[in-house]
């Protein structure tokens, strides 16, 4: 499956020296990874829920009419 991942961040940088850029990159790493994981999971879940027969089953063993439960 092809997964589309988009990021949109705004940085407020006081200068453009390498230490400032490195620090900003380190802060972004965690946010980028978290956003990527969320986007991938949502896209896989959307694809799975569109399938007539789900690639998983609920507690009753039903893989055709999965019902979200609490």
Image (cartoon, grey):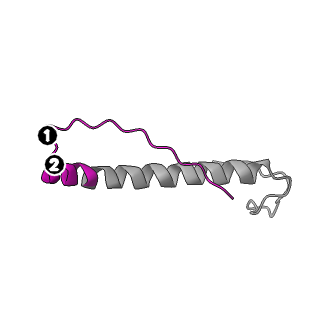
Residue 15 shows which numbered tag?
1
Choose between 11 and 34: the one closer to the eye: 11
Relative image position of residue 59 (x, y in whole percent): 73, 62
Q: Residue at x 50, y 44 (%)?
A: 6
Q: Position of residue 9 (x, y in %)?
A: 36, 39
Q: Main secondary structure of the magenta part?
A: loop
Disc 1 residue crowd, few under 14, some 14–19, many 20+, Cα 10 Å:
few
Q: Residue 66's x, y, as percent?
A: 78, 52
Q: Answer above or below: position of 9 versus 49.
A: above
Q: Which residue is mark 2?
A: 20
Tell me the SS state at disc 2. helix
Residue at left offset 13%, top offset 40%: 15
Q: Residues within 10 Å of mark 2 (few under 14, many from 20)?
A: few
* Mark 1–mark 2 distance (CA, rounded to whole Å): 7 Å
Residue drawn at (74%, 59%) of the image: 58
Left or right? Give the position of 29 relative to 46: left
In front here: 55 or 8? 8
Residue 18 included in the magenta stretch of the image: yes
Cβ atoms under marks 1 and 2 closer than 8 Å: yes
**Exactly how many numbered labels are in the figure?**
2
Is residue 15 positioned above or below 33 on the image?
above
Foreground residue among 65 and 47: 47
Q: Is residue 5 magenta?
A: yes
Name the element at disc 1.
loop
* In front of the other: 1 or 64: 1
Q: Which residues are magenta?
A: 1-25
Give the quadrant of the N terminus. bottom right
Residue under the image location 80 percent in, 64 percent down = 61
Q: Is residue 70 left or right of residue 39?
A: right
Spot occupied by residue 35 in the image (x, y as percentages of width and height): 45, 48
């Amino acid at each position: 499956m092809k997964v589309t991942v988009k990021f949109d961040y705004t940085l407020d940088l006081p200068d453009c020296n390498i230490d400032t850029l490195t620090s900003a990159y380190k802060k972004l790493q965690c946010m980028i990874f978290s956003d990527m994981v969320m986007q991938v999971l949502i896209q896989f879940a959307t694809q799975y829920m569109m399938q007539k027969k789900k690639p998983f089953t609920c507690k009753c063993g039903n893989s055709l009419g999965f019902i979200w439960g609490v």
